[in-house]
Image (cartoon, rainbow, N blue to C red):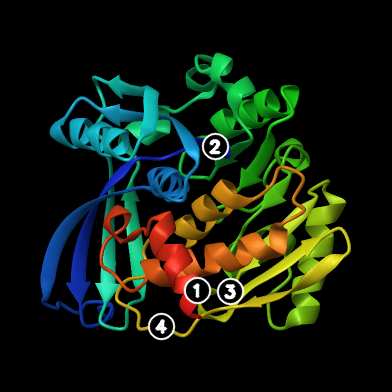
């Protein structure tokens, strides 16, 4: 069983179902409104836990009903939450998801307590790092927290996984050097490398850029087309799966959490693990909501057995 720590964001998602995005100056009607637990960090942690990882979370919530609900939701998913602290003067993070009939989404974030996840919050959880195989972070919390987490991880030989989302250009060179596996999507990759993803040659060039920064393994997610991977002498595309799409909100987070749950720390099973993570993500997009849509290990294995 992998031991996975996630340093990241916790949000409550407000999902606005709409036919399509409004044009400038246009007013449209929603066709539905729902709420669900979410946040990139929370999604990734739940995905890891549901795929069998022993999972720990480092983050913050507000002293409000949403914060209480989110801490309990993480507990209900067997995630260790002693390092998820409550900030009395902040609201729990909020995400407003504009979900179109096509299944595509656009998201507006109110970071709230996530903005207070700093280096000190990570340092307070230092004793837990030597128990981890993988430490995951994304960019919905301050970079100081991610840098501190990756430094601590490397001190105890834990492997680090960076999901550079939302896209931020010019990430610190030290952060990239401390990253063992980077998992951007096409837009995030282009933001960091300056190389637009158009074909496999541009994917290889992007991976080469990341390798030059000291990153051992690169996985660029390609939406429905699957993902491109590059590690040591292994490069190629893991094809996506053709499935009906209800909501893509947590697809990438499910992929990363499932990957961390099954990947060996030496990355020797990377290709097989990508197949598992791709299947997990394909199941996620077929259901509404973020956390509610993330499958458990049994569901993923059953789907793999039929494909």
From where the camera sits, is residue 163 visible? Answer: no
Task: Residue at 47%, 85% (x, y): give it.
Answer: 242
Task: Residue at 74%, 73% (x, y): give it.
Answer: 203
From where the camera sits, is residue 68 visible? Answer: yes
- Say few, some or many: other residues with alpha carbon within 10 Å of mark 1 (under 14 / 14 to 19 / 20 or more): few
**Mark 1, residue position:** 305
**Mark 2, residue position:** 4
Would residue 16 appear left or right of 165 to someone viewing this image?
A: left
Instruction: State which tag comes first along the sequence, 4 or 1.
Output: 4
Give the Cα separation between the discs numbered 4 and 1. Answer: 16 Å
Tell which tag, 2 or 1, sits nearer the viewer.
1
Instruction: State which tag comes first along the sequence, 3 or 2.
Output: 2
Q: Secondary structure at mark 3?
A: loop
Give the Cα separation between the discs numbered 2 and 1. Answer: 26 Å
Residue 123, quarter of the rendered image: top right
**Mark 3, residue position:** 222
- Say few, some or many: other residues with alpha carbon within 10 Å of mark 3 (under 14 / 14 to 19 / 20 or more): some
| Disc marking residue 243 | 4
Instruction: State which tag comes first along the sequence, 2 or 1.
Output: 2
**Residue 188 x/y as whole percent:** 60, 61
């Amino acid at each position: 069983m992998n031991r996975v720590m996630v340093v990241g964001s916790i949000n409550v998602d407000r999902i606005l179902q709409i036919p399509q995005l409004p044009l400038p100056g246009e007013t449209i009607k929603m066709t539905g409104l729902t709420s669900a637990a979410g946040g990139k960090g929370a999604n990734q942690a739940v995905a890891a836990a549901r795929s069998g990882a022993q999972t720990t979370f480092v983050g913050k919530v507000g002293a409000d009903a949403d914060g209480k609900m989110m801490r309990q939701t993480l507990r209900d998913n067997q995630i260790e939450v002693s390092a998820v602290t409550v900030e009395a003067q902040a609201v729990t993070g909020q995400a407003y998801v504009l979900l179109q009939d096509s299944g595509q989404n656009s998201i507006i974030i109110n970071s709230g307590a996530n903005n207070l996840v700093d280096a000190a919050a990570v340092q307070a959880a230092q004793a837990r790092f030597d128990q981890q195989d993988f430490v995951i972070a994304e960019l919905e919390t301050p970079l100081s927290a991610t840098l501190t987490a990756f430094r601590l991880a490397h001190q105890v030989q834990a492997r680090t996984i960076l999901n550079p989302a939302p896209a931020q250009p010019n990430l610190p060179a030290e952060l990239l050097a401390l990253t063992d596996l980077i998992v951007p999507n096409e837009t995030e990759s282009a933001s960091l490398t300056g190389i637009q993803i158009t074909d496999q040659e541009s994917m290889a060039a992007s991976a080469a850029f990341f390798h030059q920064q000291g990153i051992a393994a690169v996985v660029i997610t390609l939406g429905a087309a699957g993902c491109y991977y590059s590690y040591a002498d292994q490069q190629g595309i893991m094809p996506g799966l053709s499935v009906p799409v209800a909501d893509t909100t947590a697809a990438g987070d499910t992929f990363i959490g499932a990957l961390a749950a099954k990947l060996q720390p030496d990355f020797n099973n990377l290709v097989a693990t990508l197949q598992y993570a791709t299947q997990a993500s394909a199941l996620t997009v077929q259901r509404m909501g973020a956390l509610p849509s993330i499958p458990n290990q049994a569901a993923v294995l059953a789907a793999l057995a039929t494909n």
